[in-house]
Image: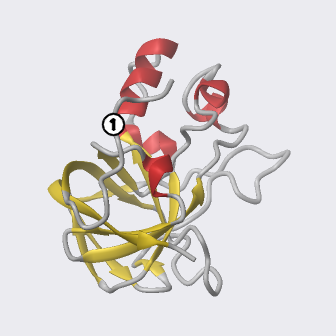
Amino acid sequence: MPNNRTCPTLLEPMKVNIHHIFISPGHNFIGHYGKPPGTNASEPLESVQCIAGKGLVGDRFFEHETDYKGQITFFDMAVFNRMVKTLGADKVAPNAMRRNVLIEGIDLNSLIGKAFQIDNLQFEGSEECSPCFWMNEAVADGALDFLVNQGGLRARILTDGWLNTGQADLTILSESS
């Protein structure tokens, strides 16, 4: 279901709300095909240290590989809320999405191929974080289909710093090459 939020124009900041930040030391789904998912917890944080080109300190994808396109992942909190309501999955917590940052106020797909800044940190949207077949198990039956084209955003971290929960300014800096 498309949302009505738009992408800001170049250098025009817009307010977003970072509801949750999570890191996890291990993989629950990657490498578990044909086996049960892992049981690594997602640790909620008020702030997380972002290292350019490497990822989030303490996360399973930190220093995963050179130029990894998912150094940080974002998920739309409004999509999460619609999904749990639609699927009757009210007991599902936001960390079930296995994304690092749950944010509200921006169409995440509009950031693909763009450099953007959240407060003083810069990122580059690399691709949609497509939902995997585990979503039906992690959330509820129907989650995989619900999340098509709204599974989140994978991004590269361009500058070092700390990302915090709460209200923030998001600015589009440029189109990526």
What kind of residue is marked 1? Arg
Task: Give me the residue at 41% from left, 32% from top.
Answer: 80
Mark 1 — residue?
A: 5
Position of 14 with respect to 86 (left or right) is left
Instruction: Name the element at disc 1.
Output: loop
**Taking 98 as reference, is 94 above or below it?**
above
60 or 35, which lies in front? 60
Which quadrant of the rendered structure holds the C terminus? Answer: bottom right
Numbered circles on residues, count: 1
14 or 94, which lies in front? 14
Q: Which quadrant of the structure image shows residue 57?
A: bottom left
Q: Residues within 10 Å of mark 1 (few under 14, many from 20)?
A: few
Q: Residue furthest left?
A: 167
Task: Give me the residue at 39% from left, 39% from top.
Answer: 94
Task: Give me the residue at 59% from left, 25% from top.
Answer: 146
Please name the colour scheme applied to the rendered image.
Answer: secondary structure
Position of 127 with respect to 33 (left or right) is left
Position of 148 with respect to 94 (left or right) is right
45 or 83, which lies in front? 83
Residue 141 placement (x, y as % from top left) = 64, 20
Q: Which quadrant of the structure image shows residue 44?
A: bottom left
Position of 91 with respect to 147 (left or right) is left
Residue 115 placement (x, y as % from top left) = 42, 71
Q: Residue furthest front?
A: 9
Residue 136 placement (x, y as % from top left) = 65, 28
Task: Give me the residue at 49% from left, 84% from top.
Answer: 54
